[in-house]
Amino acid sequence: MTHQIVSHIFTKIAFKLLRTNLFHIVLLAIFLTIGTSKLHSQEIPKEITVSIPEKKEETLDTLAIKPLQIPKKEVDSLKTDTLPKKKSVLEGIVKRTAVDYERIDQKKKLITLYNEAELHYLDVELKAGIIVMDYAKNEVYAGRIKDTAGNYTQRPVFTQGSNVIEPDSIRFNFKTKKVLIWNSRSAQSGLNFIARKAKKENDSVYFMENVKFTTAEDIDDPEYYFLARKAKFVPNKKVVVGITNMYIAEVPTPIGLPFAFFPMTETSQSGVILPTFSDTRQQGYSLQNGGYYFALSDNYDLTLLGDYYTNGSYALRFESSYAKRYSFRGNVNLRFENQITSERGFPDYAKNTIYNIQWSHAQDSKSNPSSRFSASLNLGSSSYFQNSLNQVNVGSRLNNTLSSSVSYSKTFNSVPSVNLSVTATHSQNTQTEQISMTLPTLQLSVDRIFPFASEDQPKKGFIKNINFQYNLRGENQIRTTDSLFFKSEMFKDAKVGFQHSIPLTTNFKVFKHFSVSTGANYNEVWYLKTIRRNFDEDQGQVVQSEVNKFDAFRTYSFSSSVGTTIYGTFNFSETNKIQAIRHVMRPSVSYSYTPSFEKYYDTYATDASGTMQKDYTRFESGIFGAPGKSYANSLGLSLNNTFEAKVASKDSTSTEPKKVMLLNNLNFSTTYNIAADSLPWSPVRVSGGTLLFKDKMNINFGATLDPYAINNAGTRIEKYNIDNGGSLFRMTSANMTINYSLDSTGDEKKDNDNKQGARNGGREDDLFGSNEDFGTRKGTEDKDENKNKESSEFFTAKLPWDLTFAYSLTYGNLNRHKKLTGNSIMISGNIDISPKWKLGVSTGYDFVQNGVTFTQLRFQRDLLSWRMDFNWTPFGDYANWGFFIGIKSGILSDIKWDKRNQADKVIR
């Protein structure tokens, strides 16, 4: 036995010396072979001396040594370990730390960390007041500790990956990865969970008992919660619960479900949208805004909503949003309603279909600086916003115009640069139901070319400043009505035209202070359709017919202007509050001349006798107009003024006076027609505007002054008004508007949440009330910036408020009637009467009609996780009220009560 031990020792030594050099290995092998055979019959010597020769220089030949041959029977069985190596229980390094102490109990195999203890292992992070690690059982225990007041603090925080749990205590096994949790707290996709007892089965499944889930921020004392007796929780995937009912202020309610499924994911998921029950006097009971949400991808989605009424009316809506980061974003809304009033067979029975299409697209400016595509589309039935059963938006109802624009522009970085744009526009009058469209408008422009100056040469003087451009505009114009929209008839009267223009201009200085600009303009217009008039003997009258062929006309004109700037300052005493007034005048005189293009005018017979009349041109129905028959020779006069004051600063440390704008602009303009035989002067137009109260009040005014008198029929006569016993000018019209917006913070503008109302054609402010789209009022998250700030339980003198004020005055005197045609005021205000209560009102008064205009009262209550609001329009054609209470969070937005009484819609 002894010789085996010695042999084993020397073998170990040999293997340790394996890396020294091959020559020594051979010597050791020989020594071991001889020594092992002698040990069978001899005792182990106390000392063994080995003589090792000097190291020789190694070469390739000396290194070529045959492997050591050891007989099988000489191999020691201890050299080979047949037992498999045990795999380490821990797959990574365990890091730990604590503030007070770390105690290791070797006997019980425990490690204790106390006060702000932390333990890190792989993707697991555990923080608690106390952590006990039992490395014999491969388990970790964590819990709270008491502070000096005897209260439990430092609740455990268990983090694994993106999942965070905050229990009262926790037990975790490193080997099985199973976890037992008491009073665990976690948050997933906007839902907060607290379970009395939870068990983590594996990395993806939790089983919970008596679990509460809510969207309340205070999970320990929520204003409401749902209590599930049993639940299965798969992080970032789903929650499946058994019998569940709702508790409000710890009071159980009958609202509950035998089982429920909640999808939990960071990405959008498809799902059913529950409808809202409602009723109206004309359509009966209804289910509104029910449908399905399709989460098609991370870049776009689709929402399908529908309404159904018991009298047969129904509505469909398709809503889609799309976005690509750093490229573009937009949304599309398609709305259709089939409305039935009363019952079939009754005299007031009516059926009507309305629709609306909206598309908004915006391109990121960084995606392609040389090209840009944008869209703002709002078209459909003229009566959609007046008769829609799914929204209340008075601003959209009172608006008379729907407009759209889709455009693409491209800049070619050549020399000179070229700009190209293609635009489709739409304008619709909801009162007359007339629609005007351009499908499309093509515009091409070439940048200015200076033929007498190089690029790096300064462009000064008359010759070097001579430049010209080329502009092209082509339009396909369609005029139709609401009833023919999207039908083949709308394209029958389409007009196509192209306009080419080449402006030639230059500018220079005279007498150092006068700026002179002069130029000529050449226009050429192409039409694909013209008209022809002739006398039809069969009908006995003049008829007009269309000629479908290419035709063109060419015109030219000349213009020139001279202007200067005059500065005047009126200084006062430096002790006065107003120290100086500065007046800036910019007078200008312009002249324009356009010759007669009578050659483009034709004659036609007016009766059977052959009487000829020369008063029409075949181009008169073209979209770019027709050439002028008479020449134009006019002189224009204008004067622009600004007034600014220097006032003493209220700041005693300031050495410079403060500048205050008195009048931003005060403009006068008129023209004198040199070629006119009578009444050469046109009315003088006066306009002005200013900003007051730190630019919070905007005032604009205007007036038209006619120098000529009128007769009893209201027609202008060849006699000045002053010579007819009147004043120098006769005011024919005047207008003034005042807009004032302010709030308690002193800011000029406040954030408006009525963007969809403005997109529908209404206003961004709430002068005509707030916009209510019943299909989009679910899941309205609280956007109040101050919601997280602590508020006093006592009354505070600071009440946040905002006020919007608008006044309009219009005066008319065309026929000596001297009448105020419009005089109205509109006011909208909102105030926070308490930290949770908000009150708003929109109203106005028409002094001409002597009546109150649209009035709306708004009440809103912040119920922490809930929102409650009540809107009331007490009188008028749009009298209605609506009450809503529901959970703010979008994940539980179907838990709500929405009751409203809408005004009866009259289908027009």
Image (cartoon, helix red, strand yellow):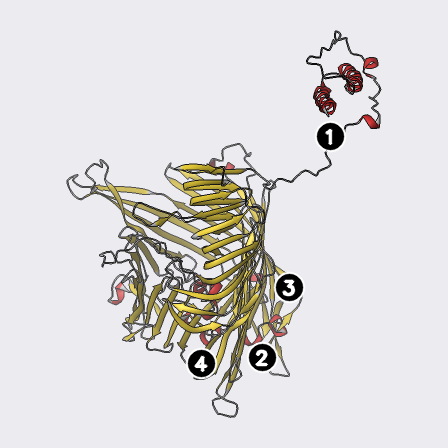
Q: Judge depth for marks 2 and 4 and give the one in front.
A: 4
Q: Are discs 3 and 2 less than 8 Å apart at CB?
A: no
Task: Choose top left, top right, bottom left or bottom right for residue 720.
Answer: bottom left
Task: Choose top left, top right, bottom left or bottom right for residue 673.
Answer: bottom left
Q: Looking at the image, tell me whether mark 1 or mark 4 is earlier in sequence order.
A: 1
The three-letter code of the residue at mark 4 reads: Asp
Give residue 273's position: percent from left, percent from top: 53, 69
Q: Which mark, by number, is residue 279?
A: 4
- Secondary structure beneath dot 3 equals loop
Give residue 160's position: percent from left, percent from top: 53, 48
Using the image as rendered, state which of residue 397 and residue 471 is in the foreground: 397
Q: Judge depth for marks 3 and 2 and give the one in front.
A: 3
The residue to which callout 3 is attached is: 528
Q: Looking at the image, tell me whether mark 1 or mark 3 is earlier in sequence order.
A: 1
The residue to which callout 1 is attached is: 78
Q: Are discs 1 and 4 less than 8 Å apart at CB?
A: no
Q: Are discs 1 and 3 less than 8 Å apart at CB?
A: no
Give residue 566's position: percent from left, percent from top: 31, 42
Using the image as rendered, state which of residue 113 and residue 210 is in the foreground: 113
- Secondary structure beneath dot 2 equals loop
Residue at (57, 67) in percent of width and height: 478
The residue to which callout 2 is attached is: 607
Q: Judge depth for marks 3 and 4 and give the one in front.
A: 4
The three-letter code of the residue at mark 2 reads: Asp
